[in-house]
Structures are given as C-alpha cells and as structure tokens.
Amino acid sequence: MKPLRPARITLYVAVALLAVIILYPIYILFLVAFSPAHFTLDALYPPQLPHAFTLQNLTTALQSYNLIDPLFQSLQVAFLVAFIALGLGIPAAYGLSRLPPGLAYGITTVLFVANILPALTIVVPIAAEFISLGLYDTAVGLALLQELVVLPLAVFILLGAFQSIPREIEYQARVDGAGLARTLFGTLVPLAKAGIIAAFLLSWMFSWDEFTFAVILVPIHPTLPVVIYDNITRGNLLATTAFAIVMTIPVILLTVVLQKYLKGEELAGGLKG
Amino acid sequence: MTPRLELRGITKRYGKRVVAQDVGLSLRAGEFFVILGPSGEGKSTLLRMVAGIETPDAGSILIDGREVTHLPPNKRNVSMVFQNYALYPNMNVYRNIAFPLKMQFFPPEEIAAKIQAIAKTLGITDILQSSVNRISGGQQQRVALARAIVRSPSVFLLDEPLSNLDARVRFTARAELKKIQQELGQTFFYVTHDQKEAEALSDRTGVLHQGRLEQVSTFEVLYNEPETRWVGDFVGDVPMNYLPDPEGGVGEEIGFRPEWVVLDSAGPRSAMVELSENLGETHYLVCVTPEGKKIILRSVVRHGPGETVRFRIVRAQRYGPDGRRMPPSPSGEGPVEGPLALTTKADARAQGPPPTVP
C-alpha cells in the first residue's frame, strides 16, 4: 500500500467524522427499535451496543396503531408532489431556459417568495380557503400546498439542466421535423434526465417529511410525520421508533433505485466547439 | 423555373447591430451556393432565418416558390448541419440518422434501407451502432451529414460544417462534400469564413459584409473583378493593391493583385522593398511606392529589404472614391502598362515562370 499523504488523511478523518454524525442517530433508532425496552428506554444508563434482539416492539406497534393509512397518505402526497413538480416544472424550466440567463434567474428568484415567508404564515389562510374549496384534509390539497415550496426548487434544478443542453440540439430537432412537444419530450427531456431525477427525488423527499403544512391541513387523515409527532407527544416512544423505521425505508429504497441516473454520464460529449 | 430558394429584402437587427440588410438572393435547383464572410457578420443568422430558427424583421423567404418566412422549421422541408454537428447525445449513430425519417413516419424497413445506403456512401457502416460520443470528429461530421441527406429536402443548410475538423481531415472532407453534392444533385446553402472552401465547393459565392451582400458571383469573378475594394481585400491570400489612377479623377484608384504585376527593370513604376516573406516557391514583397503607398508584389527571387524593384502593371481594376468598381477606362481592360511578355532575359529570371493570370 502506498503511503497516505497528509491531505488524504485529513480527508478520511473528516469523512469518518461526518459519517458518524449522520449515522449515529440512525444507529440509535435501530438499536431502540430492535432491543427490548429494558436495555434502552427503560434503562438508567442505556448501553451503546445491542445486547438482545427482539421484534416485539415492532409487532406491538403495528398491531396497536393504524400505520397503514398514514403510510398510504404520505406516499400518495409525496408522489403527487413529485409528479406535479415535474409536470409544471419541466415546461416552466424549459421556457425559462430560452430566456437570457440573467432574466431567467431573476424570474426564478421571484418564484422563491413563498419560501421566504414563514410556513405558518402561509398555511393558515390557505387552510381556511381550502375548507371552502373542499381541499381541506385531502392529499391533493396538501400536495398543492407543498408545491409552494417544492416547485421553485424543482424549477431551479431543471433550469440548470435545460441550460446545459446546447441550443443547437433543439434547433436540429426542429429542423429534422419534430414539433414542439416532440422536441421537448423526445430530445430535451432525455438529455435533462439527471436534473429531472434530482428534482423528482428532492420534491418527493421534501414532501415525505414535511410537517408544518401537514399538521394543519390534514389532521384527520394525517401523514407519517404527523403521526410520529402525535406519538411522541403522547409518550409512545417505542411505537415512534417503529414508525420512524417504516418512514426511513422508502427513502433508502428510492435513493438506491434512482442514484445510478444521477451520475450524468450520458450528458458528456456528443458536441464539439 | 422557380428558384429553389429565394430571399427577398431580408433585414434583421439585434438591437442596434444590423446582421442582415436588404439581402436578396436566388438559388437554382442543384446549386452549391456559399455565403462567405468574416466571423460574426451575420452569415449564420442568414442561414438560421432560412431554417426557421430566427425570424427576419423584414423581407420574405421562399422555398420552391412557397412563402415560408413565418413557418416553423419542421414545416419548411430543409435540413441542416450545424457547426458543432448537434448530434443527439442520447441516441446512437443509427438512431441519430433515423430521427428525421421517423419524424416523417417512414416505415421501419424503409428507414433501415435508407440508412444502410447512406452509411455505405459515407463509409460509416461499421459505426452505426456506436455511441456518438465515442467516434472521432471526422466521423461525427459524416453522421451529421448523413442525418441531413438521408431524407430529400428542398435545401440543405450547412453552417461551417468543416471548421471543427483538423486541417488534414478537412481537406478530404471538402472534396467528399462536393462529390456528394454533385451525386445527389441537391441544392446546398453553405456558410463559411474560409475562402478556400468557397473556392473549392461553390458554384456561386455571395460575400456578406456587415449584413450586406457585397457581391454574388462565381469565385473566379470574385477574385478577378471584385465589385468593391472590401471584397478585393477579403478575397485572396493577400489584400488587393491600390495606387492612384493616372487617368482617373480625384480619389479614383486602380486595384491589382500581386500576380497582375510583372517585375521588369525597364518598368515604369518603382517601389522599395520593406519586407520579404517566403511562401513556398514565391516571395511576397511588401513594398512602399514613391507615393508612400504600401503594396504587395510577388517574385521568385529573393529581394532583401531596402532594394528597389521596378515593375509594370499588366492588369487592373478601377475603383471610385466610394470604393466601388468602375467601368474599365476608355483604353480598355487588360494590360495597362505593356504586354505580359518580358523584355530582357534577366527580368525573365527575376520574374520566374509567367504568372498564371486566372
């Protein structure tokens, strides 16, 4: 093995520290979830290493609480949010990418107004309005509300993706006989794939653990974060860990499935000059 | 016969910058037409207006007699090769070439047959399944060309398609392009800043300067009878020489190319050599005339700086004060200061083989 240079060593140390900071809470989560309570929550000095393994906590939680409905509600809202973000974000970003870059980023900045305001300021009047519109306590209503925050981010990411595609590709497709829709979806969208997947993941994950909007707008059919909050306030910590694990698994799955598209390899080359 | 492509009074401005000013053109079917001009003076914009990517501020564009000025690109029946080739990076070579055919809803068997034929013509059969990112610049250029000619549009638009190739490949690609155009008998509208390409490829060349068409003619006429001094300076390896016209009025000058001059010790004119540049078999002599004008002469013999050479002009054009060409002087065109033949043997040696006056 070749000797490590000092720069390398500091890099590895930094990475290791970061990994510990990020992974330690997840480790504790799994420790509490799969250990008998007298080793963890009921112990005065809980050990840091697992001493016994049990599925009792999970089965009890799943049997005594309704987990399925919040899970489906969360999934429904997250996918709605992600698809609406792409459905509106792709045409918007494509249009913006055809403007001079300065103007395009100016407009995108204006879109972030909803992000600047405190979430609670926005959610109360909208929730009141949604009651009369019949959108209160519905997945669609919550998805639309979350779009306020998600859509500007999605547009920002997609704008970068579309701007990185040379203008000539689009012209070429038009000259080759493609109409506007075919040009956009047949040539530009495939080339912006990495950006589109990044926007999808980000939108989905934002919605997945969004709390402020959800707790006010969907109290009767809550999403997972709201259910977890409820259980924490009631002191059901073991059930909370079960829910937290259920909530973590889809995120990991989605990231693993989609991350191979995020390398952007197919974007390189193909053009000269 | 209706022209294949016709431009009428095309005008286009970007803010204050004029990129096309009342451009009028007419291309015959089967013609190889080259737009020649310096970079950034509106050549590509003109091509893009024909393609439908840009819209002119005024004027109209007709393809096969049909008004297309405001039609989108896909309704114009043109194909185009961009300078950077604009190959679709997400498709392989085969699917790139198939794209325009698919847009016209050709059946798959016909697409396959057409692509095989075109690939054979251009020698790209063995890379059809390759990714467009993994092939050389020369191959990319062929693929872009194949994609343009695989269907039969009214006009082919080519925007400096050879400028990204290295010099060697460019030379063969140029010959190949001309051959393909002749075989297809199709109309090519080609933009370049390289006059060698215009000379080698074009049936006719239009010189574009600051959005104006200065002259439209064969390259030979461009070289020998430049309509404006600007064309005379732009076309040719070296700018045209100008000296006051002894027969003309104020501001009138004669313009002549280095090879329209015979070095002759008995010649009526003299100039002092300032600089001598050796280019292959000939030396270009940068000289100053007694009037203080800089001219460039040609010689097979080396003349060092400070030497005085005598010469006579055997052929010239006349230019008015506005820089435009004037009709030949009453004495007629042709030799203005004696015949091409040389007077003494020594001069013949100094001049070398008689210049080939085109």
Image (spheres, coloured by chain):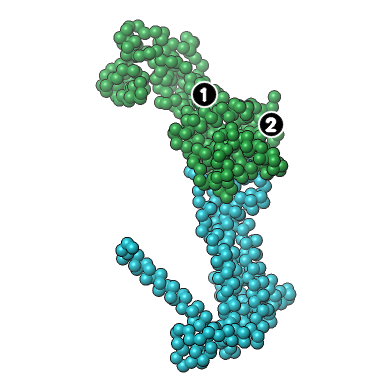
Q: Secondary structure at mark 1?
A: helix
Query: Residue A22 got which mark?
Result: none
Q: Amino acid at mark 1?
A: Phe
Q: Position of residue A181 (x, y in %)?
A: 67, 51
In the image, the chain rendered in green is B
Image height of A104 relative to B317, above or below: below
**Mark 1 or 2, nearer chain start:** 2
Q: Alpha-carbon distance for marks 1 and 2?
A: 25 Å
Residue lying at 59% horizontally and 48% vertically, measured from the top left: B91
Image point (39%, 15%), residue name: B261
Residue drawn 38% across the image and 13% down it: B353
Q: Which residue is mark 2?
A: B64
Q: Quadrant of the N terminus of chain B?
A: top right
**On screen, residue B344 above or below B84:** above
Asked whether the viewer can see residue A159, the reply is no
Q: Give B206 or A169, whichever is nearer the viewer.
A: A169
How far across and down, in percent of the image, does residue A198 sit?
55, 62
In the image, A5 versus B5, the foreground residue is: A5
Chain letter for mark 2 = B
Q: Which chain's residue wears label 1?
A: B
Tag 1 residue: B219
Residue A259, horizontal then vertical, whole percent: 54, 63
The quarter holding residue A146 reads bottom right
Left or right of B214, for residue A178: right
